[in-house]
Amino acid sequence: MSQEINAVMNEYLPLRDVVFQTLRQAILRGELEPGERLMEIHLANRLGVSRTPIREAIRKLELEGLVVMIPRRGAIVASITEKDLKDVLEVRRTLEIMAGEMACERITPELLKQLEEAGREFMKLKDTNDFTSLAEVDVKFHDTIYAATDNQRLITILNNLREQMYRYRLEYLKDTGSHERLNCEHHEIYEGIKRGDKAAVSAAIGVHIDNQRDAILAAIRENGKGQMKAE
Amino acid sequence: MSQEINAVMNEYLPLRDVVFQTLRQAILRGELEPGERLMEIHLANRLGVSRTPIREAIRKLELEGLVVMIPRRGAIVASITEKDLKDVLEVRRTLEIMAGEMACERITPELLKQLEEAGREFMKLKDTNDFTSLAEVDVKFHDTIYAATDNQRLITILNNLREQMYRYRLEYLKDTGSHERLNCEHHEIYEGIKRGDKAAVSAAIGVHIDNQRDAILAAIRENGKGQMKAE
DNA sequence: CCTGTGTTTTTTGTATACATATATAGTGAA
DNA sequence: TTCACTATATATGTATACAAAAAACACAGG
């Protein structure tokens, strides 16, 4: 049993963690849709494990808010309302600015170089249609800023908040018209951090998130069928 | 089996959640010390349940960061280093200020009244030795501000960050010399929110958290024996 | 044709069983 | 005495078994 899974387990990883990451990705990528039930036996058969690791993975997803438990009915994929998304973006805006300002003070030469590189890569990719790579580079750019804060708690929270929006990220990156603007914003942020100019960085990141917010909300309102549930 | 636990279950609560809350409280109150092992069979016997709910509760504690898993050895209560605590307080400072500023704009008359009342209760209690009630009122004061933000995500994160420091809260509230200052700070925050004066609120909350930070760090450095592990 | 009730099925919640890895203790030899 | 090796005990990781609750279904009666 669990051949395909155990193959990945070169170094030690409990099945529950494999299942957790698998389900998590599936939810964030939209392969499991909001409202969909997570039935233990079904998932167990599908992943080739018993119910035990499935259940333990669901406990973690529950705490993370990615699934909602219904008493004696099990777990369903959590729906994100527009209000939820606004709330997340509001907090994220504040913390991204915080991270940027901290980076102004604490960034190391290596990380600054890495940041510049991520910015360059984004510029190279911005006119292609390779949205996946583009998203990756975008993540790398922001991750570098996070790393510069030297605050693990902040990094963890920011990563979580960002991932809450993964379902919508790709959608909004497909709006190629915004790439040039994103590129400019990245450059402005990079230059600000390089100069240690907190006010400039703060303003640039604020604009950056606001634009992202507007783009995502617009995208949702257009084709908000499966993605957004009423409740 | 599980007599004492089932007694509490008038309305439906899975055993795993009862166990989760029980263990969580025990860790936050310091009844389970950092580094202590959480052995499943032992806990199961102690709480009168089987290993299954214990394990599921541990999965949640793991994601919350209150326990750390050691491969094939199980869970131990997470140690908080001084760096961890500083990181938490740094993030918390930013978000508490954010909450205060949002409260300036969004607070309702009822919540404003509740805030005033919490402030008054704190004043009444500040010269007694009833530290538990004092802590409760302090929590209520801040909870009211959180509620005024109308941002559920922010509330969740702030509650979590605050709870991360529960182990140290009581310690620092026992420093009766600081009560008068805390009281003034509360009053200043309340007045600022009432006037909608964001700058004043921001400054007051900043000072409030900074003082708390210094007090906690000082308390830890004094008797940092059991509480702080090198890891 | 609709409705209410009893039965069956499905699925969760909990307990237990089994395999394996790690720690521990004990024994023997250098 | 000390080191090494083996046997044993203990605890985790996973699978399975069992009970109970909820949903689905069928059937009888109006």
Image (cartoon, coloured by chain):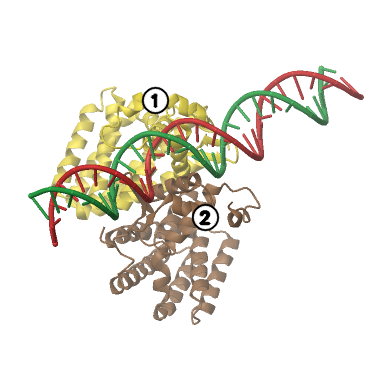
Chain colours: A yellow, B brown, C green, D red
Residue at the spot of label 1: A1
The foreground one among B171 and A191 is B171
Rendered view: A195 above or below A180 = below
- In the picture, measured across the screen, residue A201 lies left or right of residue B205, that is left
The foreground one among B157 and A142 is B157
Question: Which residue is drawn at the image coordinates 21% and 43% (left, top)?
Answer: A190
Q: Where is residue B180 in the image (x, y as percent from the top left)?
A: 43, 79
Q: Residue B2 carries which label?
A: none
Q: Is mark 2 on a helix, strand or loop?
A: helix
| Mark 1, other Cα within 10 Å: few <14 / some 14–19 / many ≥20 | few
Q: Can residue A5 be seen in this view?
A: yes
The answer to whether dots 2 and 1 both sit on one chain is no
Residue at the spot of label 2: B47
Rendered view: B181 above or below A105 = below
Subunit of label 1:
A
Q: Position of residue D29 (x, y in %)?
A: 89, 23
Q: Is mark 1 on a helix, strand or loop?
A: loop
Question: Which residue is drawn at the image coordinates 36% and 61% (left, top)?
Answer: B93
Q: Distance between the residues labelled 2 and 1?
A: 34 Å
The quarter of the image holding the C terminus of chain A is: top right
Three-letter amino acid code of the residue under disc 2: Leu
Subunit of label 2:
B
